[in-house]
Image (cartoon, helix red, strand yellow):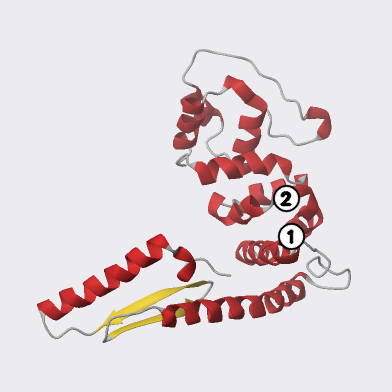
Amino acid sequence: MLCAFDRQEQQAEGQVVTFEDDLPELLKSIYPELSLTELALLFKKAGDLFSEVTKTDVLKTYGLKANQDLNSVLEILPRTPNEFQDFVHHKKLAARELSPLRAVFNLAEIKDLLISIALSTLSKSQAVSLLEMAIELYLVDRSLTKLLKNDNESSHTWLARISALRMPLTKKSDQDFALKTSALNWPSHVKAEWIRSGDQSGLQISLFATSQADFKKKLLGINKINDELTMTPEKLWTNS
């Protein structure tokens, strides 16, 4: 059995003993619950001892479906600061909540940001929101100067400041998508607009049809636009 959940430096190597039993079930019987941090450390310490099939079976035993996104997060987590690993463990974060990390090429560059988030007094949802917004802003100019928490700043004031920094970026993005939407050749009596709902934005389409034939005609017109966007996604789906 591999023991690698203690992240103290002097015990970081862990110990491995091989066995012939059903690993996923045995692991589950010993550890009824494992966080993403613990699973990530387990896979890292095991190395080649775990085949991809074994990893998939272990994840399934803990109610997780192996996919590229999850595997990427599990590979990234051990490279984050210990404080952030503990935060992910105690807050029981899901892989989708950590997906912004996948966009960062060099995690060392945002080490201080991750530590500050981990040590903040924010709730789980607030911390996840801050992580997403801060990384989005960081990717714009690769600078953390305005993103790190100030010494005299509370966690909630920090969150509000980052939200305010992000809003102009979000507003401009929505405006660009709205212009692209209106520039497309939509059929008559088909209303298409780019709208925002909370943290998400997207295309909303409504139509008015007077008959089955009219309905079919409008759908064909929408399909033509779909074909156009499939060939040239930059006309709508790729923002500039």
The residue lying at 65 percent from left, 47 percent from top is 89
Q: Is residue 150 above or below residue 89?
A: below
Q: Is residue 209 above or below residue 155?
A: below
Q: Is residue 35 visible?
A: no
Q: Amino acid at mark 1?
A: Ile
* Label 1 with label 2: CB-CB less than 8 Å: yes
Quarter-of-image position of residue 219: bottom left
The residue lying at 34 percent from left, 66 percent from top is 226
211 vs 153, nearest the viewer: 211
> Relative to residue 185, is residue 105 drawn left or right?
right
Q: Is residue 57 above or below residue 86?
A: above
Q: Is residue 119 visible?
A: yes
Using the image, tell me which numbered label, if any, was put on residue 41: none
Residue behind mark 2? 84
209 vs 23, nearest the viewer: 209
The residue tagged with tag 1: helix, strand or loop?
Answer: helix
Q: Is residue 157 above or below residue 72?
A: below
